[in-house]
Structures are given as structure tokens and as C-alpha cells.
Image: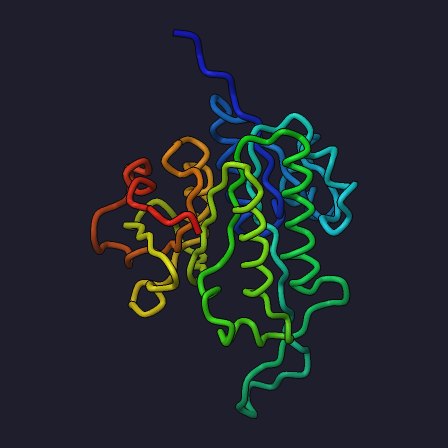
């Protein structure tokens, strides 16, 4: 039997904390994937190895995305607006820190317009599958994340998710809970819908596991045309998730 052709996959937001992991995972599986990355700055490009397969572009500028998506089979979208803490916060005085978004980097521009641009560019390039990482909490307009920097980040993420679901391109929408900088591949993963997991004790997940689910989603028909919440049990509790086909098969929600 001939070897299956390798899939060319672009990870956007490849300089980010989860994006770096997803990009690295694809590189490690070079028998199956040809990895590309998209980052916003030359500095980020250097940070992930600076190879010719890393493109530098601003996702808010639709035309700049086009070269990176030419000839790709799949796209993993890991771009996200990131709120910054105002520098004058003094924890010793109590109260909560205030956050802001830099000009031009509000969720509306990054999580909505930037993601819409990526979806449009991918569609024009004939991409066969888009994996989009959003966030849990999108069913609640009053979620505290929306008030950070007055950015309404979950509202705009949700709008981009809906745009992808309506695009006609096979998609997988992953909405992780709170992201942990912990080791991946050592927990039982849990899928849910409509933010039900937020009412439980299991509402966090290591970034490395989110990145792994992104890569696994590219390999199974069972992951296509589905949207789901994603969390993990604490390490040492439950059964380590190894069968991703079974995990995706549990999901019945298209949005």
C-alpha cells in the first residue's frame, strides 16, 4: 500500500503559547504533516525556529494572509487578542487589576475580523478543513472575560465560530476551558457542550492537550462539522485519553 500523501497544515498564532506547541507537534510528525506557521512579528518567527515555513503577516490585513495559505490542506487557527494588565496595579492595596487591549488589537479586530480574514483566505485557497480554537463561556454575554478591557472577547470569538460554521468548509470548533501550562498527554479529556462543563469541577485543560486535539482533529472524519467544549480531569484521575476517534465520536453538536 502506498504511503498516504502528507497534509500541509498552517498554524496561525504559531508564536503564541498554544500555537507554538501545535506547530511543534506537526513538525514532529513529519511523516504525516508538512507544517507551516504564521506569526505577527519577525521576533516571533525567530522564537519558533525562523524557518522558511514560518510566514510573518498581520491577520487584520486580508491580503497579507494569502501567501501563507496557498497550497495548504488544513488550517489551525490559534490567534487571539490578549488583554494586558495596566502597569499601575498594586496588589498590596487590594482590589482587582485592570486590563486593556492595545490599539488595533481589540478582540473585534483580532478574534472577529482577523479570523474572518483567515477563513475567507482559506476558502479561496481550497482548504479542506479548518480547526478553530475558541473558548468556553460564549453562551453567557455577561461572562467576566467579556468585561476585560471592555473587549467582549467571547462575543467576537463566537461570531467568528458562527462564520466558520456557516462557511461550508469542513470545520472543527474547539472551546477549551481555562488553559494550564502543564504537561500534556497525561489526563483524561472531557468533551461537553453549551458551557455545561463550567458548572463542574473539571473546567481546565493543559495547553498541550488542546494542541494535541487540534492535530488529532485533522486525522478523523469524526471531528468534522463539530463544535465542542474541552476540558480535562485532574492528572491521575480517570483514564488517559488515547483514542481520539472515540473522543470525537462522542460529540453530536454542530455548533
Location of residue 149 with respect to 6 vertically, above or below: below
Q: Residue 179's spot in the image, x, y percent?
A: 45, 59
Q: Residue 6's spot in the image, x, y percent?
A: 52, 21
Determine which quarter of the picture holds residue 156: bottom right
Horizontal arrangement in the rendering, residue 122 relative to residue 162 (left or right):
right
Q: Residue at x 57, y 37 (%)?
A: 75
Determine which quarter of the picture holds residue 194: bottom left
Q: Residue at x 65, y 63 (%)?
A: 107
Query: Furthest residue to the left?
Result: 238
Q: Residue at x 61, y 51 (%)?
A: 79
Location of residue 164 with respect to 215 vertically, above or below: below
Horizontal arrangement in the rendering, residue 102 relative to residue 5 (left or right):
right
Q: Residue 242's spot in the image, x, y percent?
A: 29, 39
Viewer-nearest residue: 103 or 132 = 132
Query: Furthest residue to the bottom?
Result: 93
Viewer-nearest residue: 205 or 140 = 140
Q: Residue at x 58, y 58 (%)?
A: 159
Query: Furthest residue to the top?
Result: 1
Q: Residue 235's spot in the image, x, y percent?
A: 28, 55
Determine which quarter of the picture holds residue 55: top right
Viewer-nearest residue: 119 or 176 = 119
Location of residue 206 with respect to 203 vertically, above or below: above
Horizontal arrangement in the rendering, residue 192 relative to residue 100 (left or right):
left
Location of residue 126 with respect to 149 vertically, above or below: above
Amino acid at each position: 500500500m502506498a504511503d498516504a500523501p502528507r497534509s500541509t497544515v498552517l498554524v496561525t498564532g504559531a508564536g503564541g503559547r498554544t500555537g507554538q506547541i501545535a506547530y511543534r507537534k506537526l513538525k514532529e510528525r513529519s511523516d504525516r504533516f508538512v507544517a507551516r506557521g504564521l506569526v505577527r512579528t519577525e521576533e516571533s518567527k525567530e522564537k519558533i525556529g525562523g524557518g522558511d515555513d514560518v510566514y510573518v503577516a498581520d491577520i487584520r490585513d486580508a491580503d497579507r494572509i494569502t501567501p501563507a495559505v496557498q497550497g495548504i490542506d488544513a488550517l489551525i487557527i490559534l490567534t487571539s487578542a490578549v488583554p494586558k494588565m495596566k502597569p499601575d496595579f498594586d496588589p498590596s492595596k487590594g482590589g482587582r487589576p485592570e486590563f486593556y487591549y492595545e490599539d488595533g488589537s481589540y478582540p473585534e479586530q483580532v478574534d472577529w475580523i482577523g479570523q474572518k480574514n483567515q477563513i475567507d483566505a482559506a476558502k479561496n485557497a481550497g482548504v479542506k478543513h479548518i480547526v478553530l480554537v475558541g473558548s468556553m463561556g460564549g453562551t453567557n454575554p455577561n461572562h467576566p472575560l467579556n468585561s476585560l478591557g471592555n473587549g467582549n472577547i467571547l462575543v467576537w470569538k463566537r461570531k467568528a465560530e458562527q462564520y466558520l460554521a456557516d462557511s461550508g468548509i469542513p470545520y472543527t470548533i474547539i472551546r477549551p476551558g481555562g488553559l494550564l501550562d502543564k504537561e500534556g498527554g497525561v489526563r483524561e479529556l472531557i468533551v461537553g457542550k453549551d458551557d455545561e462543563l463550567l458548572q463542574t469541577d473539571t473546567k481546565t485543560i493543559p495547553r498541550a492537550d488542546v494542541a494535541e486535539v487540534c492535530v488529532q482533529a485533522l486525522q478523523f472524519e469524526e471531528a468534522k462539522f463539530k463544535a465542542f467544549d474541552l476540558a480535562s480531569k485532574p492528572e491521575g484521575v480517570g483514564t488517559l485519553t488515547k483514542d481520539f476517534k472515540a473522543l470525537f465520536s462522542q460529540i453530536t453538536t454542530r455548533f
